[in-house]
Amino acid sequence: MRLRDEDDDESNNDLRLFAEWILAIGDDKCGTSIKGIEKIQIPNDILIENWDDPILEICKATYLELFGCSNNIAHIKDKAILAPTLQMVDEINSFMMNLNPGEAKIYYSSDTCQNNANNDILASVHTPDSLNTIRCSEIPNHKLTLKVGTPIMLLRNIDHSAGLCNGTRLVVTKLRNHIIEARSLTGNDMEQKVFIPRMTLTPSDHRIPFSF
C-alpha cells in the first residue's frame, strides 16, 4: 500500500495510523467475529453517515471534482478507493466508468488451462466458459470495459526502466484492438506516453488448484 507523505508531522502521523489500521484489517487482526460475521469499528473521522447509495457517496467523498463535470483528472492521481471484495471493486469501477460520457470499448480474455500431463482432463472439466468466470486480484476480469479518459492502474510489472510497475497510475488516451495507449499520472515519467499490449498472465492465487 502506498500513501502520500504530507508536509506536516501531524498529518504524517495520521497517515501512519491509518495505514496500520488498514493492514491490521487485511491481516485479520482488527475487529470481532460474531457467528461468522466479521464486524469492524470504523473511526468517526472517516465514516460517511446518512447515505442512501453507499457507492455514490464514497465516490463523491473521494472524487468530488468528477461530479462537477471537470475534465482535469490530475487531481485523482493521489486518490484511491480500497474495497473489501472483488465484487465491490467491479461495482465501483462500473459506477465510475459511467461518469465518463465517452464510447466504451470491450476487451475479452482468452482463457485456457496450461499444458501439463493432465491437460486433457483439466480442459474437459474447466472449459473456457468456466475459466471466464474466475476472478483474481492479479488479473483483469474476462470482460474489460474501458473508455478514453479513464484512469487505470497496472496490476503487474511490465517495464521497470519505463516506470511501468505494479500500482502505476495511467489515463487511457487511445484504445486499439490489441494495444492500450495511455500516459502516466505518477512518478518521474509523468505525462509520458506508454503502450500496454495484450499479455499472457497466470494467476498465482493458491486457492485455484490448477494453472491457466
Image (cartoon, rainbow, N blue to C red):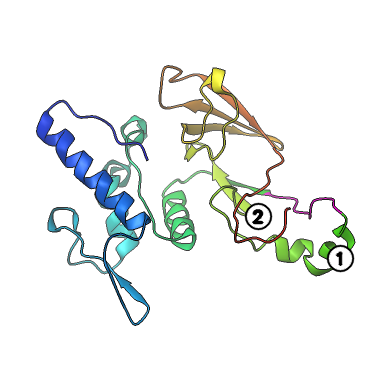
Task: Residue 85: name its quadrant.
Answer: bottom left
x then y, percent, for residue 207 = 60, 61
| Amino acid type for the residue under numbered disc 2 | His
Above or below — where is 39 with respect to 178? Answer: below
In this rendered view, identify the residue nearer to me: 92 or 72: 92
Residue 193 lies within the magenta run:
no
Q: Residues within 10 Å of mark 1 (few under 14, many from 20)?
A: few
Judge left or right: residue 166 versus residue 204.
left
Residue in the picture at 14% in, 35% down: 11
Q: Can residue 192 be spotted in the picture?
A: yes
Instruction: Residue under label 1, please give it.
Output: 121
| Amino acid type for the residue under numbered disc 1 | Ile
Residue 109 lies within the magenta run:
yes
> Which numbered mark, 2 or 1, is in the foreground of this view?
1
Residue in the picture at 32% in, 34% down: 78
Above or below — where is 25 with respect to 71? Answer: below
Q: Can residue 103 be spotted in the picture?
A: no
Judge left or right: residue 208 versus residue 120.
left
Which mark, residue 142?
A: 2
Residue in the picture at 32% in, 39% down: 79
- Tag 1's secondary structure? helix
Q: Residues within 10 Å of mark 2 (few under 14, many from 20)?
A: some
* Marks 2/1: CA–CA distance: 22 Å
Magenta stretch: helix, strand or loop mostly: loop
Task: Residue 134: name its quadrant.
Answer: bottom right
In this rendered view, identify the residue nearer to me: 135 or 183: 135
x then y, percent, for residue 193 = 54, 21
x then y, percent, for residue 162 = 55, 19
Which residue, as the protein is rendered here, is positioned at the far bottom?
A: 35
**Which stretch is magenta?**
108-116
